[in-house]
Image (cartoon, rainbow, N blue to C red):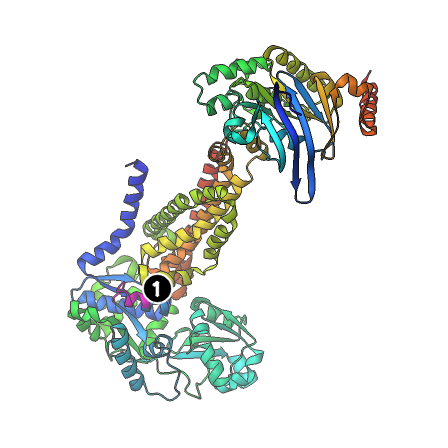
Amino acid sequence: MIAPAAALAADAVTKRYGDVTVLDRVSVSVPRAACVAIVGESGSGKTTLLRMFNRLVEPDAGRVQVRGSDVKTVDGVELRRTIGYVPQDGGLLPHWTVQRNAELVPWLKHDATRAELAREALSLAGLDPVRFGTRLPSELSGGQRQRVAIARALAARPDIVLMDEPFGALDAITRGELQETYVELRARLEVTTLLVTHDLREARRLADRVVVMRAGRVEQDAPMSEVVANPATPYVAELIRRALTDDIAAAP
Amino acid sequence: MSARNSCILVALGVLLQTQAHAQTDRAVVVASKPFGESYLLAEMFAQIMEARGLRVQRRQGLGATEIAFRALRTGAIDVYPEYTGTGLLAVLGEPSQPGRSARDVYDRVSREFRRRFDVRWLAPLGFENTYAIAVRRTTADSLDLRTLSDLARESSKLRAGLTPDFIGRPDGLPGLTKAYGVRPRAVRSLLPAVKYQALAEGAVDVVDGYSTDGLIKRYNLVVLQDDKNFFPPYEAAALARSALANDNPRAIAALSELSGRIDVERMRALNERVEVAGESVESVARSALADLGLTGTTTARVGNSTATREGREGSLISYLVERRGQIARMAARHLLLVALSLIAAIALAVPLGLALERLPRHAEQVIRAVGLLQTIPSIALLAFMLPALGIGVVPALVALFLYSLYPIVRNTYSGVQTADPAAVAAATALGMTGRQVLRYVRFPLAAPVIMAGIRTAGVIAVGTATLAAFIGAGGLGDPIVAGLALSDTRMILSGALPAAALALVVDGVLALAERVATPPR
């Protein structure tokens, strides 16, 4: 069932690689300006689902819609230029400066104001463009690199951002800082976000709604509070129990 | 036209100049095969024609029979010394008929070569130089070897060291095996320059030589008697293009002055002066012609500086210093050959490697096909190209170009293929097209790998370019080939040492380029 106002929607999508069914009739929908987190362990199919929204993966069955239109009717390259993307490892071009990395998407769209847009995005992501613009990714810390990746995703002012474990490789403190930055950003930009993470606490912090996936199927799709209060399956319950234990262990 | 392009054109012009020159002035091109006697006879051909007022160009040390004869047929050279027996067996491919007379063989090759190849045998020079199968005296005594039949009886105990030519040709080992049943325990391919020494030192037990070799006596070797008359008569004669007779009858007249004038004792003595005493080919030829009364006396030439400084005494260093100008010229030519072929290879192989990234389905097949080129032995490749490209600079450049392709294509392809996967994935996800990813991400990131491939190709080309001497393209291979033919170690080193130095320099320069090409990270 697709809500008419959804920015992103997948309807009963299935994906198989040989004999392995990675996604089995999965449906997800992200309303405009909302943030939905897909939570699951590796192999749950969450990244494959994410990559369907910018046509990096085509479904074997089912429908994928972006801004209300079927992605099959849109050119993949053009589509990708309208959707921000933040991968886990940053994926910055190592031979380009911070400024040039941030300019990437506006440059691809032949936007004459790309330098301006990149500087703005870097500032939003918490990096001083004057201080960091001329540096190379190798001259930055992991957290700073991920800030550049966020700036790069936002520079062309997309209304949708896909994030694939964006903070997964960072230490706990830096991760917390970046999560905070993103919460602030979202409040200002009203950008629709689909976040893939294995970390329930990150989902709770950033997302309005959580989709728990396991082995290519959706276990539960609900607001975080409801997932915590009424886990739909023993697997979800176990996931929550472990996340809470981690919280206690992480407390001083 | 860019400065770089004009540079390349000038360089090509310099390389081709010698050839163009030869064509306009109609110099007679005299060649030899890569062994001492052939050098000496060719030099005598050249000098007598010069004495009769003809312009001569020397192209000594061409590959072996195959390359020299093809060069003659294609008109790249005009004349070189050849042996009737070689013509009969190796060129005409006729089976050996024991007991055939020298006259009979000469008539046969004369008629067939004229008819089939438009090539003329001038009247024989006056001596035969047949194959001589030689063993150490101790081996001959202990196994009681006197004839080739004796050798066949004991051959399974013996290791043979044979020239590559002899191993393959029908009047060589295959014929010996058929006629006598000679089957050595092992056969090693040895160049003429080292085979006698290898025999004397016991590294092998049997070698093939020539009956006029000066070294047989020096090493106290026993030549086994050809008791079944297997080897046909090998009369030496000038082999010339028929066109030479039409274009330049004076050349034929000059060459014919040598006919019947050189007997086997004289030839052996001359060979000994070159191979054992270490006199230069140029001065031995000069004095031989004077002794035959064909040119002025030798004393007229005594003032001539390096030519008269005979013998192989003196240090290697002083030898190299003395020839520094010549070595520098050869090194420059060598470097030009390498540079031009490498530039051409880069121009094809890098775009090809990039294109294959876009067509990954065909990549492995194409790269394997290019790699196959690499497995063709260089001499064979040069021989294949001879009919189409002749001898000289052009086929050498083509061969070096072909050999340079593989390392560059391979590295370009795998460089762009394996470029930072995270950066490639992110660039794609943000909307770069495949071509944009190749151009802005994969290619710059692969640059150091591509440069490493170019560096490999460059160093290999410096080594391979020494073989260009076999087809008369010059470079540092010239003294190596000549030195091998004349058993002159210093001459070999005067080409090999600069070539090694050049390889290091090329490697160093390209290593620097590799560092510059490495994108900052």
Q: In this view, does A21 lie above or below B97?
A: above
Q: Can see residue A131?
A: no
Horizontal relation, residue B409 to residue B286: left or right: right
Q: Where is residue B246 in the image (x, y as percent from the top left)?
A: 16, 70
Specify the quadrant that holds the N terminus of chain B. Answer: top left
Q: How crowded is mark 1: few (under 14 residues within 10 Å), some or many (20 or more)?
A: many
Specify the quadrant that holds the C terminus of chain B. Answer: top right
Q: Can see residue B208?
A: yes
Q: Which amino acid does label 1 sit on?
A: Leu
Report if residue B376 lies within the magenta region.
no
Report if residue B75 lies within the magenta region.
yes
The answer to which of B64 and B53 lies nearer the viewer is B64
The answer to which of B230 and B450 lies nearer the viewer is B450
The answer to which of A234 and A149 lies nearer the viewer is A234
Instruction: Report in which chain the residue with disc 1 lies.
Output: B
Write down the region rendered in magenta. Answer: B70-78
**Residue placed furthest toward the top:** A188
Q: Write down the residue under mark 1.
A: B62
Q: In which quarter of the image is residue A235?
A: top right
Q: Where is residue B166 in the image (x, y as percent from the top left)?
A: 44, 73
Q: Is residue A161 above or below residue B42?
A: above
Horizontal relation, residue B491 to residue A3: left or right: left
Q: Is residue B112 above or below residue B380?
A: below
Q: Position of residue A11 (x, y in %)?
A: 65, 29
Which residue is rendered at x = 65% and y = 37% of the image?
A: A15
Secondary element type, mark 1:
loop
Which residue is rendered at x = 65% and y = 42% of the image?
A: A17
The answer to which of A224 and A140 lies nearer the viewer is A224
Q: Position of residue B41 (x, y in %)?
A: 29, 70
